[in-house]
Amino acid sequence: MKKIIFVLVTAGVVCLFNGFGALAEDNAAGGGGGGQKFDPAVYRRMKLDKKLDKKLDRIKEALGATDDEWKVLEPKVEAVQKLVTLERMGKSVRQGAAAGDAEQAPGDLEKKVKELQKLVETKDTAPKAVKDKLKELRDVREKSKAELKKAQDELRELLTPRQEGQLLLLGLLD
């Protein structure tokens, strides 16, 4: 038994050092990753994509979907998941979450939230400017809600009642 453990530990150490050696060669040859420099935004996006992949795997399992069913459902589920996340981000900013949370939201909502935050943080901002920005943000949120409802309806058409119940419990459907 001790010999087996010794062999496994030795193999692990060799693999570990080989991995570090390849990484060092990559970095010496131009920064790793095919000559690309480390970009925190890209890293954050990759991390979020991995989280989404894990979440989608859990959803597939909860739905009991076959691979063929999932090929049809996945794009719809992913679209709904992203829109739900976007809507939640908008609500969390409204409820006083940190400004860093807004960086996860794509597009107009992120832009409008950041613009409003700047106006509100500036004490001498004209009230009309704040009112105008509030209206713009509300309009973008309404558009986002409409997109979410449409995506949810399209997904709902493909689901069995049990699957619809699962997604309702997971917070993806209303």
Image (cartoon, rainbow, N blue to C red):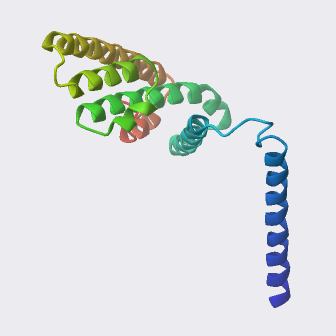
Q: Residue 115 or 166: which is nearer the viewer?
A: 115
For this rendering, which residue is in front, 31 or 55? 31
Q: Which residue in the rendered view is the most extreme toward the left?
A: 127
Along the line of sight, the residue nearer the viewer: 166 or 8:
8
In the current view of this chain or complex, which residue is farthest to the bottom? Answer: 2
Residue toward you, 82 or 41: 41
Q: In the rendered image, which quarter contains the N terminus? A: bottom right
The quarter of the displayed image where residue 143 is located = top left
The residue sitting at 85% across, 72% down in the picture is: 11
How many discs mark residues in the rendered view? 0
Looking at the image, residue 170 lies above or below residue 2: above
Quarter of image, res 96: top left
Residue drawn at (82%, 65%) of the image: 17
Coordinates of residue 169 in the picture (x, y in percent): 37, 41
Which quadrant: the C terminus?
top left
Q: Is residue 148 visible?
A: yes
Image vertical order of residue 96 relative to residue 131, above or below: below
Residue displayed at 32% across by 39% down = 98
Q: Residue at x 61, y 35 (%)?
A: 42
On screen, 62 above or below 18?
A: above
Write down the quadrant of residue 103 in the picture: top left
Task: Provide residue 123's location: percent of width, then percent of height.
Answer: 17, 25
- Report x, y in % for residue 137: 29, 16
Q: Please give left or right for residue 109 compared with residue 18 in the image.
A: left
Q: Is residue 78 left or right of residue 96?
A: right
Coordinates of residue 90 in the picture (x, y in percent): 32, 28
Residue 174 in sight: no
